[in-house]
Image (cartoon, rainbow, N blue to C red):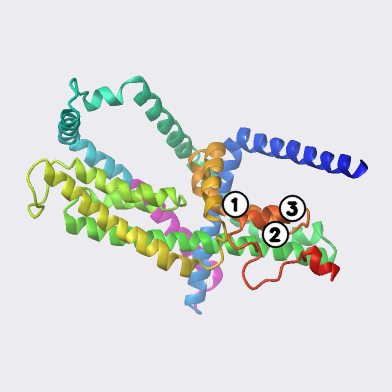
Amino acid sequence: MGVGMDRASKVGIWIIATGVIITFLYYGRGILAPFALAVFLFLVIEGFASVIDNWSRSIKIGLARAIAILSVLGGFFGFLALMANGIAEFGRDGGEYETRINDMIGDAYGALHMSNAPTLQELLFNETGQRFFATIANATGDLSGDLVLILIYVAFLFFAQSSWTRKLDNIFPGFETRHQVRKIGDEARQSIEVYLWTQTVISALITVLTYVSLLALGVKNALFLSALIFVLNYIPTVGSIIAALVPPLFALVQPDLPAWVPGAPPQDSYIYAAIVFAMVSFWQFSIGNFLQPRMMGESLNLSALVVLLSLAIWGALWGIPGMFLSAPLTVLMMILFAQSPSTRWIAILLSADGNPQGKGVKPDVEDSSEAAL
């Protein structure tokens, strides 16, 4: 009776604690999400600095950090300028795109023997369309408004970095405890750094190959679409699927098609979009399934189902920042849960191979039957 009551009280405490944490994460997203983005941007810069330091023996780590900071910030602001230019270019050709889309809507309604086909404006500016675009605009506006705050956080993280070791020594004066905390922190940092850095390299490689392919196929505004793919590839699983669909959708409604496209209007648009989809999907599939696992190793030892669930949960809690950070945040949770026998079972469920400490590492918790023998 007493054991049952004790177990029930532990379950109740777990439920209450989980509810409190989720509530805190949701209502504190205005502060926590920008800070989390700043931490992971800091780790990307540190990973880049480590690569520069390892490649060049003559460059000291301080100079390597300066080069990494300037490179990352330059690339970031260059990306923003590229996105703004791409949107402006689409805006200049907006009338032609709108006419093409209206023609396709009319063709679709005619194929289904339906009348009164709506126009693009009617679809976008009805109640559902306005609500959808308002949600996207609010999320994007919040993220843009937090940009300065994120950069300030990153700057202070670099300033505070030198004192972390001394603070850790004062918080954990015992050698064994301090060693264990450092081990956990190093493992978490290394896993997240490897994941973020590898994801950046993979996204850049896919972006370059996609850009060259789109140029060869004659897709308009190929640079803008490729940059969009670079960002989408940071979202696990779903991002790569969306990235493979975006260029074909724009190719489908492109007003002027290249002369080499076979078929006659409107069939040639579908053939053109299918060719673009095949080419973009080829790079996404081949690099994502063959090169990325080899580069990433065991830094993302998460179950595929867990990746999808974490994407949905963190997206619901923190919106767009949560979707981008869902994988590294879940990896961090798995590493922390693996440190305690009472929460290790959660880490095992989150992991892909049942061993949250990675392959080749013997689990700390032995099976009860083996212990009995």
Categorize mark 3 by other alpha carbons within 10 Å: few (<14), some (14-19), many (20+): few
Magenta residues span: 58-82
Q: Do the residues labelled 3 and 1 touch (CB within 8 Å)?
A: no
Earlier sequence position, callout 1 versus callout 2: 2
Q: Are marks 1 and 2 in contact (CB under 8 Å)?
A: no
* Rendered residue at 52%/54% (across/down): 304
| Quadrant position of residue 285 | bottom left
Q: Name the residue under label 2.
A: 163
Residue 154 shows in this picture: no
Q: Which SS class for mark 3?
A: loop
Earlier sequence position, callout 3 versus callout 1: 1
Q: Please state which of residues 286 and 99 is positioned toward the viewer in this rendering.
A: 286
Quarter of the image containing the C terminus? bottom right
Residue 171 shows in this picture: yes
Rendered image: mark on residue 137: none
Q: Mark 1 points at which residue?
A: 330
Q: Give the amino acid type for the residue marked by disc 1 in the picture.
A: Thr
* Rendered residue at 60%/41% (across/down): 32
Chief SS of the magenta region:
helix
| Quadrant position of residue 118 | top left
How many marks overall? 3
Q: Nearer the viewer, mark 3 or mark 1?
A: 3
Q: What separation in Å lies between label 3 and label 1 (alpha carbons)?
A: 14 Å
Q: Give the amino acid type for the residue marked by disc 3 in the picture.
A: Thr
Q: Nearer the viewer, mark 1 or mark 2?
A: 1
Q: What separation in Å lies between label 1 and label 2 (alpha carbons)?
A: 27 Å
Q: Nearer the viewer, mark 3 or mark 2?
A: 3
Q: Please state which of residues 70 and 314 is positioned toward the viewer in this rendering.
A: 314
For residue 183, above or below residue 114: below
Spot occupied by residue 302 in the image (x, y as percentages of width and height): 57, 57
* Rendered residue at 45%/50% (across/down): 235
